Amino acid sequence: MDASMASSTLPGVKLSNFTTSKFNPNSSVINLKFAATFFTCSAWLHAKLQVPLRSHTCEIKCEVSRNSGSISKLKLDGPIKNRGLTGKTFSSVGICTDPLSDNESHSHVEEEKVGVLLLNLGGPDTLHDVQPFLYNLFADPDIIRLPRLFRFLQRPLAQLISLLRAPKSKEAYASIGGGSPLRKITDDQANALKSELEAKKLPTNVYIAMRYWHPFTEEAAQQASRRAKPHESNVILYIKRDGITKLVVLPLYPQFSISTTGSSIRALQNIFREDKILSKLPVAVIMSWYRRYGYIKSMADLIEEELQSFKTPREVMIFFSAHGVPVTYVVDAGDPYKDQMEECIYLIMQELKARGIENKHRLAYQSRVGPVQWLKPYTDEVLVELGQEGVKSLLAVPVSFVSEHIETLEEIDMEYKELALKSGVENWGRVPALGLTTSFITDLADAVIEALPSAAPMPTFPTTSSSQQQFARDPVGYAIKIFVGSFLACLLLLSPRMLSALRKPVV
């Protein structure tokens, strides 16, 4: 089997056995043998990793400060080359999975007690949950990336933002039934995935981890556990209870971003780092899967089906609307999300063209908040432009979401639809999220099976916060910085522009 291998070192993460899969020749998997914290706001990749791909390649360049262990640079080096992809298999930079070797078989895999942990954002179950949900969201340093001097303000700032934004967000959730449907949909996806894996002769326990609402990542880790001593933590208790011998972590985000997959993985690794028993559990993490053909085909199927609902399908503009991230994530932190999203759209359109569908398409980014610059073009601005350009039929495609939630049901179906119709668009349609699409669930099951051989324990690492380090080195200087930072932060937060931005609704 033709295999390309590479190894590199992240802060606490070792990449090894990076091969092409015999199930999907272009699927890649990271073997997390020394995983600690990956893609945090202050953690950086250390080496340059060039990933061999079929028909196209890209490089990830990374630099790390060995003294501080913080990220100083991470970016994709150069555009993806040779985009003339016509095959039916695609690769995914950052996907963590290794192929089964020729000596391995599914019968061997069946001997393992396998767990699958689905990662998702989460959402408030009721209107009463909206404000605390928003607080959890904005208290995450991977969502609001404050300068080092202001990091002590993370929680107070999160409290202020959540209080200011809660009223508008409650109105949005009220319009879709009074809460987010994300938990129920994710439960259904977990059950469907479990059934599909059992059909493939791989019995598994499937768990759910929501980043900002129940079940939180910590609670999901607790689900995955047998017999415990009275003094042992719940996490250890549940791991022992189910007797999991291998765990596959599967984020329900097709593309990797620091603010989604990165944040969830960081939280999960913190749990493993702090628990001696969990740190011995072999784990494989699938970082992204937007290049898998099962996903590309499923998206193309949904688009092709929805196009038929228009009177003249060939005249419909296919409008991909992706969740945005601040530009600083991409420029300063090296978030690969933008590159991965653009390639994802390219692959979907290539699949459609192979079916004879030659419709024009556009990509834009939605859900920006705050006064900072986000990835452009913005969805609302592009909708107005398309109406002015004379586009009469538009098919919206929520490309970064695999489940219906506030951003599809309220933002796209209500806000953007109304804006498009006011701007001159006459015929509006929207592709549903993948949800329980059979081909999509089947492909996720295949990804899990392919990932299993790469599972390896995560060792523990001692941690000392940067704030503690600064205080120990120079307590007087640190106190001065805190005072100055507090004063400047108060001026910033009380500015009219900031207050206006913070009152806008959020997911």
Image (spheres, rainbow, N blue to C red):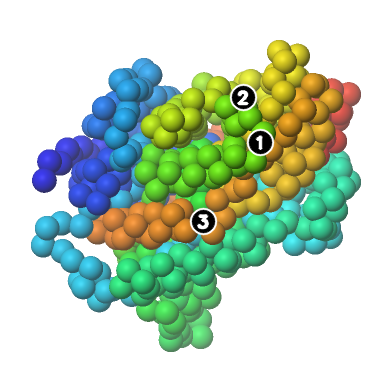
Foreground: disc 1 or disc 3: 1
**Whether label 2 touches label 1, CB < 8 Å:** yes
Whether residue 34 appears in this view of the structure is: no
**Spatial distance from mark 2 to mark 1, Cα to Cα?**
9 Å
**Whether label 1 touches label 3, CB < 8 Å:** no
Choose top left, top right, bottom left or bottom right for residue 80. top left
Label 3 environment density (alpha carbons within 10 Å; few <14, some 14–19, many ≥20): some
Total residue callouts? 3
Q: Is residue 307 left or right of residue 28?
A: right
Please name the amino acid that badge 3 sits on.
Answer: Thr
Choose top left, top right, bottom left or bottom right for residue 430. top right
At a point 30% along the width and 20% down the height, the residue shown is: 82
Please name the amino acid that badge 1 sits on.
Answer: Phe
Q: Secondary structure at mark 3?
A: loop
Please name the amino acid that badge 2 sits on.
Answer: Glu
Whether residue 377 appears in this view of the structure is: yes
Foreground: disc 3 or disc 2: 2
Camera-nearest residue between 280 and 438 = 438
Residue picked out by circle 3: 437
Q: Where does residue 489 sit, x and y in percent of width and height? A: 77, 29
- When the figure is inspected, residue 430 is found, relative to residue 241, above or below; the finding is above
The label on residue 228 is: none
Q: Where does residue 12 sit, x and y in percent of width and height? A: 35, 46
**Spatial distance from mark 1 to mark 3, Cα to Cα?**
22 Å
Q: Where does residue 244 sit, x and y in percent of width and height? A: 37, 74
**Whether label 3 touches label 2, CB < 8 Å:** no
Residue picked out by circle 1: 310
Q: Earlier in the sequence, mark 2 or mark 1?
A: 1
Camera-nearest residue between 423 and 133 = 423
At a point 75% along the width and 19% down the height, the residue shown is: 387
Residue picked out by circle 2: 315
